[in-house]
Image: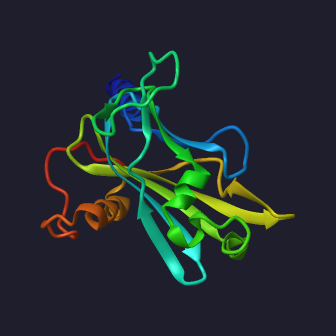
Amino acid sequence: MTAIWLIYLQFFYFSYRRSNRPFMIIHQAQGDGPEAPCLFVNMSKEPIHVQSIVAYLDTEDGLRSCFITDYQRHSPEDSQAGEGLREGPIQPGGYLVLGSFNDIFSCHPEVGGDHSGARAALDGRKLELCVAVTHGPSQHLIGARREFRIRQARNATTLQAHSIYTEQLTSRRKRKDVRRWVQERFSPEQDSEQEDRGTEQKMD
């Protein structure tokens, strides 16, 4: 009987842990062209607070990064799209409109204004979107990351997601990458390699 109860307790524990784990989506909406909007959606059961959004672009001159600061915030109760605050939590079911992929390209001056020359050189290269957030129950930074491949054919640019899933960066090892994104923007005095502290529930 004790063994049965232990199995039940373990089952309920893992179910609770799984249901309260943060889950975020970086979504390419309405087509695969650069005019398609890019959404960041909070599918967690708790609010999340966005700390940093960075776009890494693979170019012939190396990896380029820029920070996305212009976006629209929407809650599940919004009946129509409207410009929202750039700060504050995203409620469960809420999302950010990061702009179109053209807008994201525009923060990279070397390709933002050129649809034929510089962008043609990006054929087969990648655009990686990375979002660093603080999750409601935790004091630590976690993140989400998704990679898109850039294709150029017949003077048209398309973007194809490398995977159907958004990578969830919640493990201790991956949280180091998330801290680095924030430090690149804000340059805090804290050592980037400082070990996580606190009473956060361990996440795999």
Give x and y (percent) for residue 160: 71, 55
Give x and y (percent) for residue 138: 23, 41
In the rendered image of this protein, does residue 41 appear above or below residue 179? above
Give x and y (percent) for residue 29: 65, 39
Query: Residue at image x 44%, y 15%?
Result: 77
Which residue is at the far bottom?
Answer: 61
Numbered label tally: 0
Which residue is at the far right?
Answer: 154
In the rendered image of this protein, does residue 106 appear above or below residue 200? below
Query: Residue at image x 33%, y 39%?
Result: 86
Can residue 174 be seen here? The reply is yes
Side of 113 where 41 appears, left or right: left
Side of 110 where 204 appears, left or right: left
Give x and y (percent) for residue 16: 37, 28
- Towards the viewer: 40 or 23: 40
The figure's colour scheme reads: rainbow
- Towards the viewer: 157 or 129: 157
- Towards the viewer: 22 or 86: 86
Can residue 169 be seen here? The reply is no
Query: Residue at image x 67%, y 52%?
Result: 34
Side of 157 where 118 appears, left or right: left
Which residue is at the far front?
Answer: 113
Query: Residue at image x 62%, y 67%?
Result: 126
Q: Quadrant of the N terminus?
A: top left
